[in-house]
Amino acid sequence: MPSRSPASRAGRPRSATADAAILAATRAALVELGWSKLTLGDVATRAGVAKTTLYRRWAGKNELVVDAVAELFDELELPDSGSLAADIEGVVLQFAAILARPEAKSGLMAVVTEATRDDALRERIRASVVDRQKRLVVEGRSRAQERGELPPETDPAAASRTADLIFDMVAGAVVHRTLVSGEPVDEEWVRGFTLVLLRGLAGEAAHPSAG
């Protein structure tokens, strides 16, 4: 799976400290300036690095902003709460809390808007955000199967399709409620959403797709 960093380039070794400062500065600039006014020069100044440092790491603003947003979602962790329902509720509440942060709102809305006009940017979002966070679905299903809450899967292709569907349902519902409708993602809503999702999983287990 691709790293959130751009393709490796020749040159001096990467500094994790500089990377973190640059990505944090990018998020701060997005909140203050918005996408249209954000420049790599401004980010470099905020991060306390030379502009050439950014260009050695990122080809341009699009790639930089996607990686700054992706870093936020890397904070997501699947809790081991003893049941699939509790695990889902825990990670959904984490996701909503991240989306409620100004830098996540500004960054995600900006890159999604730009991606409607830029296929390469859309692919980078898929690789750096979507594909990376599908690990939570895969891990959660595997854990539930070990507990006996879900049946084992014998068809890798079907399992992958189901993981994609679950991710789309969770991400789509939470992003819509948080960023579009502006409604709270509180514990009551999360319990109801989880119940609906678990009913769907139970139905999928009872009537698996023929492919």
Image: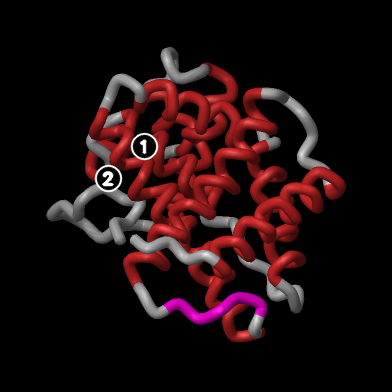
Residue 103 badge = none
Q: Is any part of residue 29 visible from this angle?
A: no
Say whether residue 29 is left or right of residue 114. Answer: right
Residue drawn at x 60%, y 76% is: 150
Q: Observer-nearest residue: 207 or 103?
A: 207
Q: Which of label 2 and label 1 is nearer to you?
A: 1
Read off the magenta span: 149-153
Q: Is residue 33 left or right of residue 2?
A: right
Image height check: is 161 above or below 110?
below
Label 2–label 1 contact, CB within 8 A: yes
Q: Which mark is residue 64?
A: 1
Check the picture and name the quadrant holding the C terminus.
bottom left
Tell me the chief SS of the magenta region. Answer: loop
The quadrant where residue 17 appears: bottom left
Q: Which residue is mark 2?
A: 57
Q: Is residue 152 magenta?
A: yes
**205 up-or-down from 36: above or below:** below
Disc 2/disc 1 C-alpha distance (Å): 9 Å
Position above or below: 167 against 44: below
Instruction: Describe residue 161's horizontal placement relative to residue 178 as left or right.
Output: left
Where residue 157 appears, x then y in whole percent? 32, 66
Mark 2 belongs to which amino acid?
Arg
Q: Residue at x 51, y 32 (%)?
A: 108
Q: Residue at 60%, 30% (x, y): give it.
A: 105
Q: Indicate the secondary structure of the residue bearing disc 1.
A: helix
Q: Nearer the viewer, residue 55 or 12?
A: 55
Q: Position of residue 153 (x, y in %)?
A: 45, 77
Q: Residue furthest top?
A: 37
User: Callout 2 environment at 10 Å: few (<14), some (14 to 19), or many (20+)?
Assistant: some
* Total numbered circles: 2
